[in-house]
Amino acid sequence: RIAMAEVGVSEEMDAEVLDRLFTMWDKTGDDKVDPILFLVGVSPLASVMDIEVRLQFAFELFDVKKTGKISHGDIMLILAGINATASYFGDAVLTAQQIEIIADDVFKSATAAERGDKINYMDRLDEFSNHPLVVQFASGGGTMRYGTAK
């Protein structure tokens, strides 16, 4: 609550939602979360723009060193974080396997020279946002809800 007040989250409803999301992300109950993963997870709540803008914001938040690059594991963490926040609201979500498929597909499509350990996320943003599983998820058609297959 202190951090929310410091950044100007004054609407009681917004503060309540963020507080509950914080509690969900606090796996050990010690009132601590990984700040980057938490912010990435809730980043889609900060924009009503299209999925490409939301993903770009999430990638930029995660990229604290401002390299413009993310690894396969980074993609998995980012998408899993967004997925976890969606699950809090009862939205249909992706399975862990679907998240891995998205990461695999986007990573595989990068050229060998570009790929290395990381890819340039800005160069792949269109591919991310138009991936069939991302489109399905963004339109509320994920295949899981509350951990149960549809």
Image (tube, helix red, strand yellow):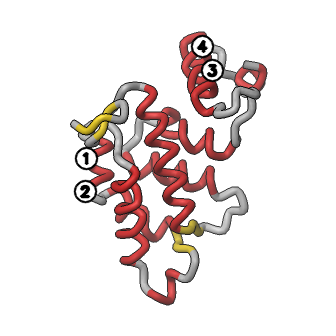
- N-term-proximal mark, 4 vs 3: 4
Mark 1 neighbour density, 10 Å: few (under 14) some (14–19) many (20 or more): some
Q: Position of residue 53 (x, y in %)?
A: 45, 49
Residue 11 - label: 4
Q: Are the residues flagged by discs 3 and 2 in contact, CB closer than 8 Å?
A: no
Q: Where is residue 150 in the image (x, y as percent from the top left)?
A: 21, 36
Calculate the distance from the C-alpha at mark 4 to the C-alpha at mark 3.
Answer: 12 Å
Say what secondary structure mark 1 lies in: helix
Calculate the distance from the C-alpha at mark 3 to the C-alpha at mark 2.
Answer: 32 Å
Residue drawn at the location 46% of the way across and 88% of the way down = 112
Q: Mark 4 is on which residue type?
A: Glu
Residue drawn at the location 57% of the way across and 26% of the way down = 21
Judge left or right: residue 147 versus residue 2: left
Calculate the distance from the C-alpha at mark 2 to the C-alpha at mark 1.
Answer: 6 Å
Give the labeled residue for mark 1. Answer: 136
- N-term-proximal mark, 3 vs 2: 3
Calculate the distance from the C-alpha at mark 2 to the C-alpha at mark 4.
Answer: 35 Å
Q: Mark 3 is on which residue type?
A: Asp
Residue 29 position (above or below residue 10): below
Residue 132 - label: 2
Q: Mark 2 is on which residue type?
A: Pro
Judge left or right: residue 11 versus residue 144: right
Q: Nearer the viewer, residue 27 or 11?
A: 27
Q: Nearer the viewer, residue 3 or 71?
A: 71
Say what secondary structure mark 2 lies in: helix
